[in-house]
């Protein structure tokens, strides 16, 4: 009896199970048959989780943070930008001059800005010393001039820290010495320990190079060519001979000035604004570091930016003034710096095109970019590249002009192929310009870098060339 009850229960259970399966199958038939073995795909979080960047070691001039700070969220005011795939671990921020956000992608996350650090160095040095500041290189002697023999009986001293003192300027010193009646120096050529020539980091090498360059016999072809270009570009020496040569009988040394040294004349560099333009256009690391040294190095530059642009220290931390190595900046901090820099330039009746390269028009890192008929002259900014540091870095920040207005932008690409990053930047910026009404050209007429740097001066004591023996 119990066996029959169990069997009846068993068959009842099977009947119920068949009924349920039939109902489920009917429901699937109505809603569409599910493909077999197809599992639900879990979509990754929209917030990227980057691999921690190697720690930044504390130096005497910096206290950089250990790893990038990652923010959350992405905002776009143009729907079409929602479909843009930004490569690598990246931050992008574009704003109008009145503060309206076009795109904000992880702008509070820290990245390696590479040579975009030079924007900070440029702002800090221009703000501190003034746009028309000139570096002085003073020429001294402790001897007397024998005009019959054309000999300076004594030593010639050169002091100064002009970072742009180059080959043509060395010939220029010889030219001015010749005008004073000096063709030979019986003593030594001595430079101070802060003197640099032709981007050399050694004062001793600079002294030897200066001695060689002043002598027409030992002067290199490159120096002779640079001098001739300088004569043409400066328009200072017209209608007379530009031959120049001074020989030195003694040696070359690095020493301080003696108390009995007398000033012969001074060589003044081109205005600082022109030096900054060249530094930014060619992304010259030597010049940027030398300029930053005048402010106390990377720490001094960072402090000026943090205070003036009201940027938290954790969002703007530098170890170098050129962008080499590991630095940490957020796109938001970089854009605040651009706003502060733009305001400063406007107060001095200048614009970004006076201190940064204009794409497609100026020589340098942006010469071959954004140079089509569509966007020629519409982008002014600073590039940055690090091939291996932080897994590969390519950055670009500055100003773009469109038919609907002017916009500030920051693009920080990190941890990936530099060429791919640059290709993204080259297509992304014109696309944004197109969505904002099309590119428009900045009001800018390019000036050759050699002409900019030829704006030097020779200044004599009391405003006139004075006989040394007087």
Image (tube, rainbow, N blue to C red):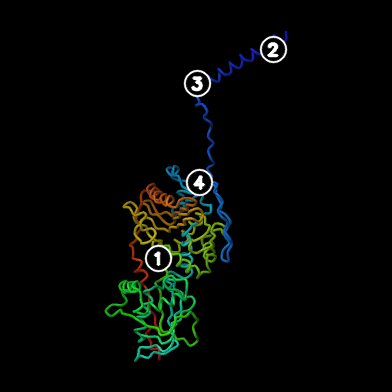
Residue at 51 percent across and 69 percent down: it is 295
How far apart, in angstroms, are the residues tagged by discs 1 and 3? 72 Å
In the displayed structure, 50 sits above or below 41; it is below
**Residue labelled with disc 1:** 278
Q: Work out which residue is located at the far left of the displayed protein and give it.
A: 239
Question: Is 443 in front, or is 248?
Answer: 248
Q: Is residue 387 visible?
A: yes
**Residue labelled with disc 2:** 6
Q: Are marks 2 and 4 in contact (CB under 8 Å)?
A: no
- Of labels 4 and 1, the one closer to you: 1
**Residue labelled with disc 3:** 29
Quadrant showing the N terminus: top right
- Of labels 3 and 2, the one closer to you: 2
How far apart, in angstroms, are the residues tagged by discs 3 and 2? 35 Å
| Mark 2 or 1, nearer chain start | 2
Q: Work out which residue is located at the far right of the displayed protein and give it.
A: 2
Q: Are marks 1 and 3 in contact (CB under 8 Å)?
A: no
Q: Position of residue 177 (x, y in %)?
A: 37, 83
Residue at 58 percent across and 16 percent down: it is 19
What secondary structure is marked by label 1? Answer: helix
**Residue labelled with disc 4:** 74
How far apart, in angstroms, are the residues tagged by discs 2 and 1? 97 Å
- Of labels 2 and 1, the one closer to you: 2
Q: Is residue 140 visible?
A: no
Q: Are marks 3 and 2 in contact (CB under 8 Å)?
A: no
| Mark 4 or 3, nearer chain start | 3
């Amino acid at each position: 009896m119990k066996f029959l009850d169990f069997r009846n229960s068993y068959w009842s259970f099977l009947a119920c199970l068949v009924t349920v399966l039939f109902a489920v199958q009917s429901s699937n038939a109505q809603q569409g048959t599910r493909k077999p073995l197809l599992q639900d795909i879990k979509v990754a979080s929209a917030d990227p989780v980057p691999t921690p960047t190697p720690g930044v070691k504390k130096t005497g001039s910096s206290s950089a943070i250990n790893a990038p700070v990652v923010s959350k969220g992405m905002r776009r005011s143009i729907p079409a930008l929602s479909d843009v795939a930004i490569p690598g671990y990246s931050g992008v921020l574009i704003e109008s001059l009145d503060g309206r956000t076009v795109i904000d992608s992880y702008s509070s996350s820290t990245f390696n800005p590479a040579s975009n650090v030079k924007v900070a160095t440029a702002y800090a040095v221009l703000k501190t010393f003034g746009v028309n500041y000139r570096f002085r290189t003073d020429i001294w002697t402790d001897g007397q001039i024998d005009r019959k023999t054309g000999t300076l009986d004594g030593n010639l001293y050169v002091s100064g820290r002009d970072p742009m003192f180059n080959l043509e300027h060395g010939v220029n010193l010889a030219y001015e010495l010749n005008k004073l009646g000096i063709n030979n120096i019986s003593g030594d050529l001595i430079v101070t320990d802060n003197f640099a020539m032709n981007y050399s980091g050694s004062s001793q090498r600079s002294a030897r190079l200066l001695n060689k360059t002043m002598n027409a016999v030992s002067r290199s072809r490159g120096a002779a060519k640079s001098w001739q270009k300088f004569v043409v570009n400066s328009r200072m020496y017209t209608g007379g001979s530009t031959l120049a040569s001074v020989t030195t009988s003694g040696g070359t040394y690095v020493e301080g000035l003696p108390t009995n040294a007398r000033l012969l004349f001074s060589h003044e560099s081109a205005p600082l604004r022109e030096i900054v333009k060249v530094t930014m256009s060619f992304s010259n690391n030597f010049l940027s570091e030398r300029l930053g040294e005048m402010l106390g190095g990377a720490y001094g530059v960072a402090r000026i930016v943090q205070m003036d642009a009201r940027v938290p220290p954790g969002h703007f931390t530098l170890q170098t003034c050129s962008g080499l190595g590991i630095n940490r900046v957020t796109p938001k901090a970089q854009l605040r710096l651009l706003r502060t820099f733009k305001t400063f330039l406007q107060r001095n009746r200048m614009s970004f095109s006076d201190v940064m390269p204009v794409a497609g028009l100026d020589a340098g890192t942006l010469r071959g970019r954004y140079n089509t008929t569509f966007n020629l002259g519409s982008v002014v900014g600073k590039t940055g590249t690090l091939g291996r540091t932080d897994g590969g870095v390519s950055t670009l920040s500055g100003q773009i002009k469109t038919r609907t207005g002017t916009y500030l932008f920051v693009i920080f690409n990190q941890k990936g192929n530099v060429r791919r990053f640059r290709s993204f930047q080259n297509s992304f910026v014109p696309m944004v310009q197109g969505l904002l009404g099309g590119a428009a050209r900045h009001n800018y007429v390019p000036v050759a870098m050699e002409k900019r740097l030829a704006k030097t001066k020779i200044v004599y004591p009391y405003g006139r060339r004075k006989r040394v023996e007087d």
